[in-house]
């Protein structure tokens, strides 16, 4: 069952090998998740989240713990039967550059595959990081309109400088049927990529 998906891995930190627990989030993760995300939000790096929003969307979230410390998080949010967004990706500043971000994106992409999504996308300031994770840049205007509902409450709505990135998970699945499913994307994110 995906909601109890869990796996362990090892990370090196300060010369010591520590066991990491990677799993879907639970309600008792909300307080540490809010601390991690809202510390970055205060610096304008991420969108702020409230306890209410976290409760509503907790099933989107995955977490990585080292012992009792939350060291990273991320979410997979579905937009249509074929596409989802990787969002709320954050690594505790003390744990940056230890492979936590990579492991989280890999877990979210695995989850997307389990749900048979054809593609995942992200809005981000760290395009080089997402490139390393197998994403490629696309025009923001190519994303489904639904995506913009989050943007409406963003302080940078009028001057957004985030980069839209996409990873196609099932290119073969889409190529032949694209023209027959015009509603699938509400603005078709994949057409320009698959044609190139
Ligand atoms: C971006 C972030 C998630 C990366 O997490 P991390 O755990 O430090 O990254 P990793 O150690 O897993 O790095 C994986 C690879 O990406 C590279 N990388 C990491 N951060 C990078 C960045 N900001 N720019 C370019 N490359 C980056 C690493 O060098 C590494 O490359 P390698 O595999 O060739 O060695 C983390 O820095 C973070 O939480 N940033 C603040 C919040 C944020 O910007 N979130 C993204 C919102 S969409």
Image (cartoon, grey):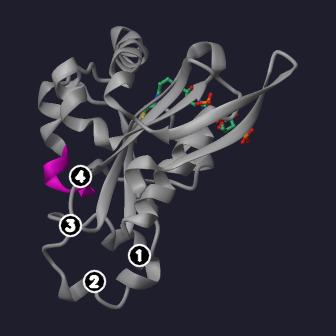
For the residues labelled 3 and 2, the Cα–Cα distance comes to 10 Å
Residue 133: x and y in percent read: 59, 49
Residue 70: x and y in percent read: 52, 21
Q: Which residue is mark 4?
A: 141
For the residues labelled 4 and 1, the Cα–Cα distance comes to 16 Å
The residue carrying pointer 4 sits among few (fewer than 14), some (14 to 19) or many (20 or more) residues within 10 Å by Cα, namely: few
Write down which quadrant ligand 1 falls in: top right
Q: Earlier in the sequence, mark 4 or mark 3?
A: 4
Tell me the tag on residue 178.
Answer: 2
| Quarter containing the N terminus | bottom left
Is 8 placed above or below 36 here?
below
**In the shown orientation, is residue 63 left or right of residue 8?**
left
Residue 58: x and y in percent read: 29, 35
The residue carrying pointer 1 sits among few (fewer than 14), some (14 to 19) or many (20 or more) residues within 10 Å by Cα, namely: few
Majority secondary structure in the magenta region: helix
Magenta stretch, residue numbers? 142-147
- 137 or 172: nearer the viewer: 172
The residue carrying pointer 2 sits among few (fewer than 14), some (14 to 19) or many (20 or more) residues within 10 Å by Cα, namely: some
Closest to the camera, between mark 4 and mark 3, is: 3
Q: Which residue is mark 1?
A: 194
* Mark 4 in CB contact with mark 1 (< 8 angstroms): no
- As helix, strand or loop, the secondary structure at mark 2 comes to helix
């Amino acid at each position: 069952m995906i909601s109890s998906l869990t796996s362990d891995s090892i990370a090196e930190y300060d010369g010591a090998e520590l066991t990491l627990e990677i799993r879907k989030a639970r309600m008792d993760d909300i307080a540490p998740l809010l601390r991690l995300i809202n510390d970055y939000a205060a610096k304008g790096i991420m969108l702020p989240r409230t306890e209410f929003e976290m409760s509503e969307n907790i099933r989107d979230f995955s977490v990585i713990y080292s012992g009792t410390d939350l060291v990273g998080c991320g979410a997979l949010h579905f937009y249509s039967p074929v596409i989802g967004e990787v969002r709320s990706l954050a690594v505790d500043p003390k744990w940056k550059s230890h492979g936590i971000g990579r492991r989280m994106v890999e877990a979210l992409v695995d989850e997307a595959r389990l749900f048979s999504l054809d593609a995942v996308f992200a809005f981000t300031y760290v395009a080089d990081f997402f490139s390393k994770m197998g994403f490629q840049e696309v025009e923001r205007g190519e994303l489904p309109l639904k995506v913009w509902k989050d943007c409406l409450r963003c302080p940078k709505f009028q001057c957004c400088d985030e980069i839209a990135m996409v990873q196609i998970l099932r290119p073969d699945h889409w190529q032949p049927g694209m023209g027959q499913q015009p509603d699938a994307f509400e603005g078709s994110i994949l057409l320009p990529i698959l044609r190139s």
